[in-house]
Structures are given as structure tokens and as C-alpha cells.
Image: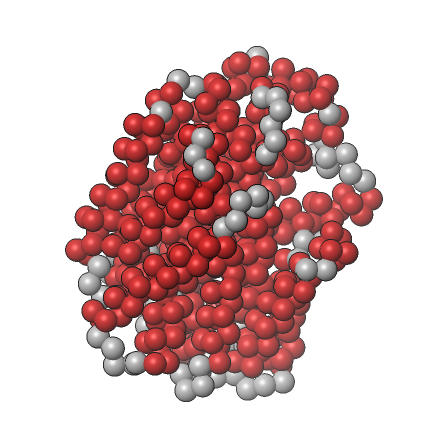
Amino acid sequence: MIPAFIIYLLILLLIGILTYRFTKTLDDFILAGRKLGTWVVAISAKASDLSGWLILGVPGKGFKLGIGAVWAGIAVMLGTYFNWTALAKRLRRYTEILKALTIPDFLEARYRDENKHILRLISAIAIVVFMTAYLSAQFVASGKVISATFGMDYYFAMILGACVILFYTIMGGFFAVAWTDLLQGMLMLFAVVILPLVGLVKLGGFGSLGSAMASTDSSLVSITTGKTGWQMWSFIIGMLAIGLGYPGQPHILARYMAIKEPKKLRQGTLISMIWVIIVMYGAILIGMVGRQLLTDVSDPERIMPLLAMKLLPGWLAGILIAAAMAAIMSTADSQLLVATSAIAEDFYHKLIKKEASQKTLVMISRISTLVIGLIAILLARPGGVVFSLVLYAWGGLAASFGPAVIMSLYWKRTTKAGIAAGMIAGMTTIIVWHNISVLSNFLYELVPGFFIGLGTIYLVSLFTKPPENVDEEFEMMKNPLASEG
């Protein structure tokens, strides 16, 4: 088991070294020069999206909720489909028209905020705050996987995984991140197909699994987990609200901005949808099967590595444990890159030294990656619940950026004041709602955060002046650009 895991880590390090020579400009480091193929974008977008949440958090929910966990799968499918069909092409074209490398870049250029940098500052604060929390959740996940598998000390296990991620991200930037995410996405697919199938065979098939779940706890075979009244609706709405988060995730949106041929986005949509359906329901099955095959599980989020070690030969278990780390690393590297771009591009390049050379900007990016990674390591305390940590950070980014991105791409009348007010309102709602237990127990904070942000943008924009020449940009966005061939 250990040799397979070590070989996987060495492959990631090799990718970092090989992609180092392709990273010569800030555009290369942040967006891979907008040269990524459809398969790389499609798989890396989903791999960076689902993270340790897929391999640890979702099986943990399958373990605790049973069939009721399918709502999370529905939410992810709906969010994925919306992003690819409603946002990807428009965002790819509009960001190239405005020569924007990041979401803060795009918002600043879209609303002619180059002098005051109000939107850039709000964006950078939201990214650094919530991405650091998100990144810490991935490091918590890595500590859980490696310590559960090899019996290592939690901190040593976490630091080992973090160092590998930091190395290849610093070396190869977006090129390394995208290509490692492609590899990791395929490993994740392999893991969530093989493990539940082996478990189902051992149990005797779906019928036996259902009977075992019903005899263990009848709520496990209920689509509402046995809840009724408002508790039921709060549960369903809260789970489906995960899908609302997709338009506001900078590390996912960056993939659409980097695609080489926007005309192939339909192909990318199909690849992503097939992949996400398989991995989400495979991950839920891991939890459901694991509850019947394992006893005395103190932490349901460790069910995947524990089940792999119980059911599979050592070498195959090692590959699946590598897949668990792949899920964690594929998101952690993307989050590092987005947080890095907030410092290198949004702070240093735009606000401090506009004439900085590309070599200097790449160096600043690499230093920022290291510093942010170290801070996230310090915050990644043992005992954290990956599912909850991810949902908080997911909601914060969603409420800050989701309404802003949607309105910027679809409503010409949107104004700078509206976007600024909406981002602040959404961000504030998430933080306040999450920290008041009566409210957070009532409903997942993303729901009020998203719609308060959206409503604020609309109302403030009605009473303020929109930027000039937006009509021309919208017309250009609707048609193929010269770079598309």
C-alpha cells in the first residue's frame, strides 16, 4: 500500500518540475496562457470543485443520512450544469475582451473601477478570508486520510500532503494545477466506482444493502431522512442550496477563463456531467456500504480509507488512498492559486507596482503561494469536520461572487455601486448567519446570503448609473473572438 501511495506523490512532483518551463508570465501562472484543452478543463474543473468533500465529506453524509444524501448529488449536478451552460462561454469571452486574468480583474474592468479599485479590494478580502478557510479544510482532510491509513501523527500527515501541493503549485502554476487535477480527477473516478462495487458484492447487492440499512435505522432508507414539517424542508432546501454556490467559486470559474476553444464547451459540459453523476453517487454509496460493513467508526469522514483497507488488497487500497489525497490536492492547489492571484495580481501588480516585470510577478506569486499555504497549515487543527468547513467557505464565496458574476454577464444595467453593495451584503450575511446558531440551524446560510446579495445588486443598480459602452462589449461577447479561430 505504501509504495503505491509514494509513487503517486512522486508523479505529482514530476509534473511540477516538467511544467516549470511553461510558466514564464503571470498569464501562464494564473490561467495557463488560456491554452487548456477541453478534457483538461472539464475534469480539472470538477476535481478542483469537489475536493476532500467528495472523498471524506460526502461518504460521511452517506454514512449518517443514507438515501437522504442524494440531495447533495442533485445540487452538484444542477450547479455544474448551470455553470457550463449559462456562464462558461460568456465568462471566457468577456474576460478576454477586457484582458482580465482573475475575477477581481473582470469586475474592475467591467465597471470601470481602475482608479478607485473598490471592487478589487472587496473581492480580494473575500477571496483571502474564505479561501484560507477552504484551504484549511483540505489540509484537515489530508491529515485525516493519511493518519487513518498509515497511523501517522495527524500534524505530520497533514504537513506531508501540504508540502507536495505547495511544491508543484509553486513550480508549475496553473499548468501544473490543471494537469495534476486531470490525473487526480481520473483517480477519484476510479476510487468511487471500485470501492462501492466491491462493497455491494460483499453485501449481496442493492437489495441486501437496502434491507440492512432499513434494519439498522429506518431513516436511512427515507429520502427525507425521516424528517417532517419545516425540518424536512430546511434539510432539502439546505442541501439543494449547495448548487447555488457554483457561480461564485473563483477556483472553478478560472477553468472556464483558461479554455482554449470556447466552441467546445458543449463537449466539456457532457464530460463534466457524466463525471459528476458517477462520482457523487459513488461517494454516497461508499458511506452507505461502509456503515453496514464496518463497526465502531468514531469519525464517519474516515469511512473511505477504512473501507478500502478492509475490502481491498494492499496495493489497490494504496491506489484508492492516493485517490482520496487526489481529491484533496485537486482543490487545495486551485484554492492556493486563486488566493495567490489575489495577492500577486490584485494587490501587488494593480495597487503597488503596475510596471512590475513578468519575472517579478511570477516570483511574487510563488512567494505568496508559500505564505498562504503556511497560514492554512497553522489553521488546520485536528477534529475539524470537512463537510461543515467546506460548506461555510463555499457559502462565503458563493454569496460574495455568485450574484455579482451572474448580473455582470446578463444585465447591462448593473452598476459598480450595486455590485459593491451586493458583495458586502452577501458576505456579511454569511458570516453573521453562520455564527448565530438559531439561524444556522434554521437554514443553511448560503440561501439568505445569495438572495440578499442578488436583491441588493438589483435594487442599488436601479438608482445608480451603469458604466458606458457596455452594449458594445455584450455584442462582442455573443460572437466568436479572433482567438477562437
Q: Is residue 89 above or below residue 117?
A: above
Q: Is residue 323 above or below residue 461?
A: above
Query: Going by the picture, which residue comes out furthest to the left?
Result: 21
Measuring from the top left, give residue 167's x and y in whole percent.
29, 51
Label total for image = 0
**Quadrant including the N terminus:** top left
Measuring from the top left, give residue 394's x and y in whole percent.
55, 55
**Residue appearing at x 47%, y 65% in the figure:** 128
**Residue appearing at x 22%, y 59% in the figure:** 23
Measuring from the top left, give residue 264's x and y in whole percent.
34, 51
Colour convention: secondary structure
Measuring from the top left, give residue 347's x and y in whole percent.
38, 75
Q: Does residue 477 appear left or right of residue 437 in this picture?
A: left
Residue 220's quadrant in the figure? Answer: top right
**Residue appearing at x 25%, y 66% in the figure:** 363
Q: Is residue 246 above or below residue 74?
A: below
**Quadrant including the C terminus:** bottom left
Residue 450 in view, yes or no: yes
Query: Going by the picture, which residue comes out furthest to the right?
Result: 229
**Nearer to the camera, 65 or 153:** 153
Q: Does residue 97 appear left or right of residue 357 in this picture?
A: right
Residue 447 in view, yes or no: no
Residue 350's quadrant in the figure? Answer: bottom left
**Residue appearing at x 38%, y 34% in the figure:** 322
**Nearer to the camera, 411 or 368:** 368
